[in-house]
Amino acid sequence: MTQSAVSAGSGAAPEAPPLLEVRDLKTWFKTEDGLYRAVDGVSFAVRRGRTLAVVGESGCGKSVTSLSIMRLVPEPPGIRAGGQILLDGEDLLEKSQVEMQDIRGQRVSMIFQEPMTSLNPVYRVGEQIVEGLVKHRGMSAAEARAKAIEMLGLVRIPSPESRVDSFPHEMSGGMRQRVMIAMALACDPALLIADEPTTALDVTIQAQILGLMREIQARLGTAIILITHDLGVVAEMADDVVVMYAGKVVERAGVRALFDDPQHPYTLGLIDSIPRLEEKRDRLSTIEGSVPHPQRLPEGCRFSPRCPLATDRCRNEEPPLRQLRDGHEVACWYAPIDEAAA
Amino acid sequence: MNATIEDVPQRRSAFRRLFRDGAALLALAVLAVIVAAALLAPWLAPHDPFATTRQPLLPPVWNEAGQWAFPFGTDGQGRDILSRLLYGSRLTLLMGLLSVAIGGGIGMVVGMLSAFYRRIDPFIMRVVDVLLSFPAILLGLAVAAIFGTGVTAIIIALAIATIPDVARVTRSAAVVVMGQDFMEAGRAIGLSDATLIRRYLALNCISSVFVFLTLRFGQVILIGAALSFLGLGAKPPSAELGMMAAQGRDFLFFAPHVATIPSLTIFLIVLCANMVGDALRDVLDPRLRR
């Protein structure tokens, strides 16, 4: 943990090109009551073998971002309104669905929020892992089965030789999430997208799954995009963090910088609303209000109606994402925040 | 959501629960006996079903004039009704089975495609609506006009008549399955559409479709018998239950058994198929489970 935070803090030095670069991604939905700009100009990069956390409240566009990378947004109603998603320099938004089938599971994989419903109930878990291997690696049934057992062992499922023949309903939520991870990693993808992988699990299992993901990352060198609303998980897992609000990136930083020196009022609010052991408080602080309805976005800064610092300028002009220092960007007129407070 | 989680164990105990339903069990037994008798017709039939005797319209044994040699009596041409019944059930069951299998198979594919590719869904469903508004009998007449009368024509007509209903039932089941997380998870590991339809969609909606087909089997036999009765089905020397009933019509007042015995057999098959289907639905359909 400490190690990764340090390396993230010093991550300013130019290094190898990122594995995945999302540039100005716009994913909109055309609905009966108008255009819904779920993701509206999001940019970030994922470095090889590292973890990028995407943080934000429900409805801020985190999940749509991850589905856009996988090209799993149904079209219609989804619209690829612009931007690029460069995986090793190839734009995924330009790929056909058939080309995407070779990329999904092989180069980019995804695990989902609900392990209870994400496995096909009529198939044995081993068969579901085997499917991807047979398709992407052209393995024979026997080879694929051996690999499936190996993967189940890797995700620490006890007696994988017999569990490979279990049905999903015979497993607990934590076990199913392990199977999902095994399925996702079977073909050794360079990037794993984990969409709130631990939200549906209880706390002790959460810690185990996160530990497992870190361990596998160290072993296989997989880059991870971790979608979460839980800052505790971010602190535990991430190297870099992107904070999203109402379809936009409001702050982007290394994990250490984000927690030590948050710049956007929204990030501050999020960090402030974490309960702390060392302080005794009667009420947790909250951010007033809720995420604006995507069809009634405010003028100017989208956070302005809820922002304690908002002024007329915020309500009229939308602040661009600008760089404060190396690797730390923020979209707020008042950043750096110490000056504004002074 | 709970239904998905508990799906398989429930399915496993489904047969056990089916056996607890006494009426359904009886119906299943009767159906099994009829099917077995039809299959074993060449060995069970006491007489050649096509051979005429010089004793036409012989009443069944429960009548004083009946003879044990012809337990259900003879028809207008002196043929043994029991033997014709055994061979006739064969043809009737085969007709029902084939048309349900063909129509059900096509209907299921159409329904799944409709749910999977939402773009073509409105189009397919309108075509299905049009097909649904044709009475099966009319369809039968049309097919007979094109292909001529005969068992094949009936099977084609019944299969076509089965497609739209099955397509609708499959589509509604498939739409629910499409909304499940595992469909997206399957996509996320790079499975092709064909694999997703075959291994994810089909297997998860087959139980509701199967129940519907069991119920449909009874209806199809009934319509098939009606078409035969109208003279569109099997050609005279062969035996088919609906046709046997039709031929008995002429003697209804002085030899009622010629028409009623095949009719009752149809009634029994349809009743049993419906009861088994109902019981299967109660057991397999989570929405009807208390």
Image (tube, coloured by chain):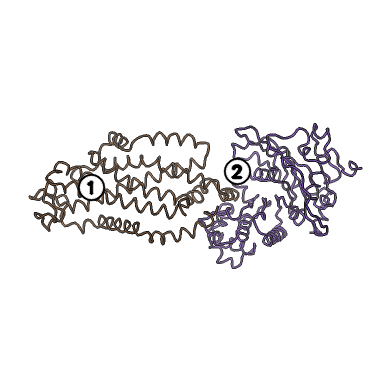
Chain colours: A purple, B brown
Q: Residue furthest front?
A: A282
Q: Residue furthest bottom?
A: A159
> x, y percentage for residue B16?
41, 62
| Residue under the image location 85 percent in, 49 percent down | A261
Q: Are marks 2 and 1 in contact (CB under 8 Å)?
A: no
Kindly identify which residue carries mark 2: A99
Circle nearer the viewer, 2 or 1: 1
> x, y percentage for residue A123?
52, 56
Local SS, label 2? helix
How far apart in space, not on screen, are marks 2 and 1 (Cα)?
59 Å
- Left or right of B99? Residue A88 is right
Tell me if residue A45 comes above or below residue B64 in the rendering: above
Of residues B147 and A324, the one nearer the viewer is A324
| Residue under the image location 79 percent in, 37 percent down | A304
Of residues A98 and B138, the one nearer the viewer is B138
Q: Which mark is residue A42?
A: none
Q: Residue furthest left?
A: B54
| Residue under the image location 44 percent in, 61 percent down | B13
Kindly identify which residue carries mark 1: B263
> x, y percentage for residue A106?
63, 51
> x, y percentage for residue B10?
47, 59
| Residue under the image location 15 percent in, 46 percent down | B256
Local SS, label 1? helix
Please, what is the three-letter code of the amino acid marked with disc 1? Ser
Please, what is the three-letter code of the amino acid marked with disc 2? Glu
Task: Report the chain holding disc 2.
Answer: A
Task: Report the chain holding disc 1.
Answer: B
- Left or right of B255? Residue A339 is right
* Mark 1 burial class by Cα count in 10 Å: few <14, some 14-19, many 20+: many
